[in-house]
């Protein structure tokens, strides 16, 4: 069961069945939920996959691995202390947005209290996730990684107004009037494919990419196959459109495509969706220009696109299915 495919369904089922609104105070259950938070980032629910994903992050950077683990603990704790439904907690639905938020702010903020700010933001991401679950329940659309995006942008923009928030020098606002497209450089297709899945967690090396694909294989083997196909189509689309080779090589056009095809073609597919595979491939191709658009829009603010192209494209296709159920 993928991210938010049970966001509200599990809550409604437990209430209709009259099951108690218990929380995760059993340590093994709590630990499992913490690890499942990692797997939910890639829209699957599997403890072993979560452990492998954490290992991939730690191999790349122990600091990122530690903040990711602590962020998942914070998000899951907030859900448990707040009295969230047990099914939602056990599936890791209060951890995945917190994980991404904590990692992002450790990377994009600097200063002596950088870690505390990242963990605070991870907690806010869990609260916003709960709020959006409630606000979007009637639409029957998943919240995906929207809490992570909004909280990360909020903290980064606040850095321009508050001295305590120190923005990393890697994020520099740029004037669009002086922007120049640079398509010089070679592209290594294998590395671009591994970097694509790695960029979901801000990683760029082959070994973490291999571990992430292994996590997908263990959790849902179809997702691993679709991830390769989606990444390949995204790379080819970006190249054919004349995208910057350096960005293609780094996987910055691939990671949103991977999440999108898994969501559209596998996780949120029903028997009624006869053309789900084709829809997924179309969605993958759409993420490339959407990524370019979001990047350009955010350039003057110095903000990263994060997973907004995934959220936008997936949201469009899932909403369209309400009217066009066969796609």
Image (tube, grey):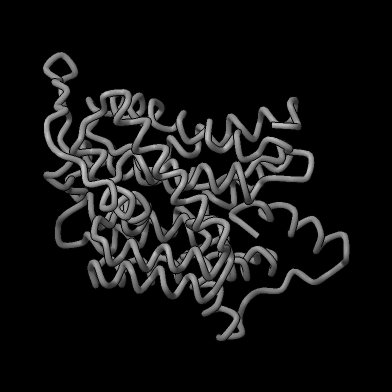
Q: Is residue 63 above or below residue 296?
A: below
Which quarter of the rendered picture does the N terminus lie within? bottom right
Q: Nearer the viewer, residue 263 or 29?
A: 263
Q: Is residue 50 left or right of residue 181?
A: right
Q: Residue at x 45, y 71 (%)?
A: 73
Residue furthest to the right in view is 17
Q: Quadrant of residue 163?
A: top left
Residue 8 in view of the camera: yes
Q: Nearer the viewer, residue 203 or 101?
A: 203
Q: Is residue 271 above or below residue 281?
A: below
Q: Is residue 246 left or right of residue 127?
A: left
Residue furthest to the top in view is 177
Q: Nearer the viewer, residue 22 or 88?
A: 88
Question: In the rendering, at what x and y percent does residue 4 appear?
Answer: 62, 52
Q: Residue at x 27, y 36 (%)?
A: 303
Q: Is residue 312 left or right of residue 10?
A: left
Q: Is residue 46 above or below residue 320?
A: below
Residue furthest to the bottom in view is 27
Q: Residue at x 32, y 26 (%)?
A: 240
Question: In the rendering, at what x and y percent does residue 225 appear?
Answer: 51, 55
Q: How many numbered discs?
A: 0
Q: Is residue 137 above or below residue 13?
A: above
Which quarter of the rendered picture does the C terminus lie within? top right
Question: In the rendering, at what x and y percent does residue 178 appear?
Answer: 11, 17
Q: Residue at x 44, y 67 (%)?
A: 72
Question: In the rendering, at what x and y percent does residue 143 appear?
Answer: 58, 45
Q: Quadrant of residue 26?
A: bottom right
């Amino acid at each position: 069961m993928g991210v938010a495919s049970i966001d509200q369904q599990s809550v409604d089922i437990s209430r209709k069945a009259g099951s108690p609104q218990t929380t995760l105070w059993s340590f093994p259950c709590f630990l499992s939920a913490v690890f499942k938070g990692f797997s939910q980032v890639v829209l699957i629910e599997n403890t072993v996959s979560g452990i492998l994903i954490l290992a991939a992050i730690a191999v790349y950077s122990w600091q990122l691995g530690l903040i990711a683990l602590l962020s998942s603990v914070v998000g899951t704790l907030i859900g448990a202390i707040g009295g969230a439904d047990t099914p939602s907690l056990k599936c890791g639905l209060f951890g995945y947005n917190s994980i991404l938020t904590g990692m992002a702010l450790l990377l994009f903020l600097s200063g002596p209290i950088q870690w505390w700010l990242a963990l605070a933001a991870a907690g806010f991401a869990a609260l916003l996730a709960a709020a959006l679950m409630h606000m979007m329940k009637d639409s029957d659309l998943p919240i995906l990684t929207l809490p992570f995006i909004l909280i990360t942008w909020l903290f980064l923009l606040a850095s321009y107004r508050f001295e305590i928030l120190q923005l990393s020098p890697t994020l520099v606002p740029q004037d669009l009037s002086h922007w120049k497209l640079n398509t010089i450089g070679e592209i290594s297709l294998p590395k671009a494919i591994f970097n694509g899945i790695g960029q979901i967690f801000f990683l760029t090396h082959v070994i973490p990419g291999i571990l992430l694909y292994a996590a997908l294989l263990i959790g849902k083997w179809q997702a691993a196959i679709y991830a390769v196909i989606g990444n390949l189509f995204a790379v080819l689309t970006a190249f054919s459109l004349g995208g910057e080779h350096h960005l293609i090589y780094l996987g910055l056009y691939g990671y949103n495509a991977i999440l999108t095809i898994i969501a559209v073609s596998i996780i949120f597919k029903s028997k009624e969706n006869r053309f789900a595979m084709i829809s997924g491939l179309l969605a993958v191709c759409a993420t490339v220009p959407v990524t370019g658009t979001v990047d350009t829009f955010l350039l003057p603010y110095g903000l990263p696109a994060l997973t907004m192209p995934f959220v936008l494209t997936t949201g469009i296709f899932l909403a369209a299915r309400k009217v066009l159920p066969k796609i």
